Image (cartoon, rainbow, N blue to C red):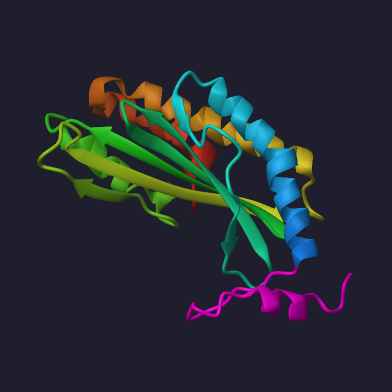
């Protein structure tokens, strides 16, 4: 490893900015290679095979994340009717990986509110509780946003396990989206819907 990487990176800094982020180029190159060469093809294959629009259409740019150790990430989405229903972020450091998920459940104004209350108050989701917003100007009157994240150290799970988790997360979010037809979720459906959601979103 080049011991002078810090000096060389400082020389590249844009002094017109009020802050500077310095990354060891060797570590950054390794992490970006891991994300783009190992995991992005798996992500892309599952997005492309979903039948939905997705973003990005090409290899994404990786991003810096503020952590105790250098961490790089990439973000991807599934979109239907110009509205994202799933967003995932895969982060990697030399110590660990993390896969974050967000599911956006849009429901009609005519939807019975009881299934909404069941999701919001569900005891198995309370570690990372869903959020509710209301858009009175849209057909998607209610939006429930569900959050989750799973990860581990590289010593506990290998890269094949990360690939399996990527596939599970994408498949589960598609399954959840397709279960709610025409923006309606009934009380009789809530148990089956939550059983799907627990595969990814159970947080307590």
- In the current view of this chain or complex, which residue is farthest to the right? 1
State the image quarter where residue 46 is shown.
Answer: top right
Q: Is residue 95 visible?
A: no
Q: Is residue 22 magenta?
A: yes
The majority secondary structure of the magenta stretch comes to loop
Instruction: From the top left corner, tell me how far across and down residue 22 is, in percent.
Output: 66, 74
The correct choice, above or below, for 32 with respect to 42 in the image is below
Instruction: From the top left corner, tell me how far across and down residue 45 is, in percent.
Output: 63, 26
Q: Nearer the viewer, residue 23 or 73?
A: 23
Q: What residue is shown at x 79% (from left), y 75% (from top)?
A: 5
Q: Is residue 172 left or right of residue 115?
A: right
Instruction: From the top left corner, tell me how far across and down residue 139 is, in percent.
Output: 15, 31
Q: Nearer the viewer, residue 185 or 86?
A: 86
Instruction: From the top left corner, tell me how far across and down residue 23 is, in percent.
Output: 69, 69
Q: Is residue 184 magenta?
A: no
Q: What residue is shown at x 73% (from left), y 55% (from top)?
A: 31
The correct choice, above or below, for 22 with respect to 110 in the image is below
Q: Is residue 3 visible?
A: yes
Q: What residue is shown at x 57% (from left), y 75% (from top)?
A: 14
The quadrant the N terminus occupies is bottom right
Q: What residue is shown at x 60% (from left), y 52% (from top)?
A: 62
Q: Is residue 201 left or right of residue 168?
A: left
The correct choice, above or below, for 136 with respect to 82 in the image is below
Q: Nearer the viewer, residue 84 or 1?
A: 1
Total numbered circles: 0
Span shown in magenta: 1-24
The correct choice, above or below, for 124 with respect to 169 in the image is below
């Amino acid at each position: 490893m080049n011991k002078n990487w810090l000096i060389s990176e400082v020389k590249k800094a844009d002094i017109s900015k009020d802050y500077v982020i310095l990354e060891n180029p060797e570590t950054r190159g390794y992490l970006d290679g891991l994300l783009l060469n190992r995991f992005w093809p798996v992500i892309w294959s599952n997005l492309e095979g979903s039948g939905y629009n997705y973003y990005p259409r090409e290899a994404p740019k990786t991003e810096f994340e503020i952590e105790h150790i250098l961490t790089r990430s990439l973000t991807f989405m599934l979109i239907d009717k110009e509205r994202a229903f799933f967003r995932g972020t895969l982060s990697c450091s030399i110590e660990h990986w993390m896969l974050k998920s967000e599911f956006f459940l849009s429901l009609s104004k005519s939807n019975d509110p009881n299934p909404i209350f069941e999701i919001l108050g569900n005891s198995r989701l309370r570690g990372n509780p869903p959020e509710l917003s209301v858009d009175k100007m849209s057909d998607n009157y209610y939006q429930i946003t569900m959050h989750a994240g799973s990860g581990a150290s590289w010593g506990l799970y290998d890269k094949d396990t990360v690939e399996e988790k990527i596939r599970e997360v994408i498949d589960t979010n598609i399954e959840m989206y397709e279960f709610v037809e025409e923006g309606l979720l009934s009380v009789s459906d809530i148990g089956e819907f939550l059983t799907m959601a627990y595969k990814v979103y159970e947080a307590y």
